[in-house]
Amino acid sequence: MTLAQERHVLVVFPHPDDEAFGVSGTISMYIKQGIPVTYACLTLGEMGRNLGNPPFATRESLPHIRKQELLASAQAMGLTDLRMMGLRDKTVEFEDDEEMVQMMTKLIEETNPSLIITFYPNYAVHPDHEATARAVVRAVRRMEETLRPKLYAVAFANNTKDELGEPDVIHDIQEVRDQKMGAMRAHISQTAWMLAEMDKRLAAGEPETENWFTYERFFNYRWHEDFEDSF
């Protein structure tokens, strides 16, 4: 599969490993096609609930470990433009709204993307996810409509299908399966238990698990639906 040609793709998520699960195949595909990709990761995930399985990190060492894991994930995807934005895990929701929007605006101005990938506001579950999505949407909304990049959004809340329906964009990522697996394995402090279970399911040929490495799904952000009042 060849993805649609883009000028530049900007990916914005709050945590190391957010990219691995949902979009590492898509990132790898764009890079393979020679399309420049920037990944802005807002925090180092220093409040991650896991310390390895068996534990090999401490609360003090986890930020350094997760930074190295993020770098390893970028390498697995072939990503060279990784921005670590310096916010603190589990506090993104408490950042000043205008400062968050300005951070996103600066990223957009620097990279001039034709496509932005982030979470879908109100359908991303975690408070840091939601705060990130709101800031991106607000920054893009302020742009002249004809100059706005496309916005692909990842949504996985329980009410997603009922309220948003089926995904608008589905990428077949089978040819970069190894890169996606490499990105997921890079974040081993957080994913060890999950990957062990996933390996068992893959060995058993479970279609739902195999699906993780076959397709990545996105929603076009619906600008005609005004979510501002619920932000």
Image (cartoon, helix red, strand yellow):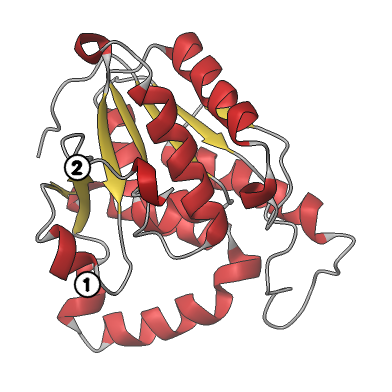
* Mark 2 vs mark 1: in front: 2
Residue 216 visible in image: yes
Q: Specify whether 115 is left or right of 21.
A: left
Find disc 1 in the rendering and name its residue: 210
- 192 relative to 220, above or below: below
Numbered-mark total? 2
Name which residue type carries label 2.
Glu
Residue 76 visible in image: no
Q: Specify whether 155 is left or right of 83.
A: left
* Residue 225, numbered label: 2
Closer-to-camera residue (32/35): 35
Q: Label 1: few (<14), some or many (≥20) within 10 Å?
A: some
Tag 1 secondary structure: helix
At x 71% / y 46%, what residue is drawn? 67
Of label 2 and label 1, which has the lower sequence position?
1
If the image is split into quadrants, where does the N terminus sit?
A: top left
Q: Quadrant of residue 116?
A: top left
Residue 103 at x, y percent in the picture: 59, 24
* Residue 147, numbered label: none
Name which residue type carries label 1.
Glu
Q: Specify whether 140 is left or right of 126.
A: left
Report the residue that reaches farthest toward the front. 229
At x 68% / y 74%, what residue is drawn? 50
At x 38% / y 51%, what residue is drawn? 230
Residue 5 at x, y percent in the picture: 16, 21
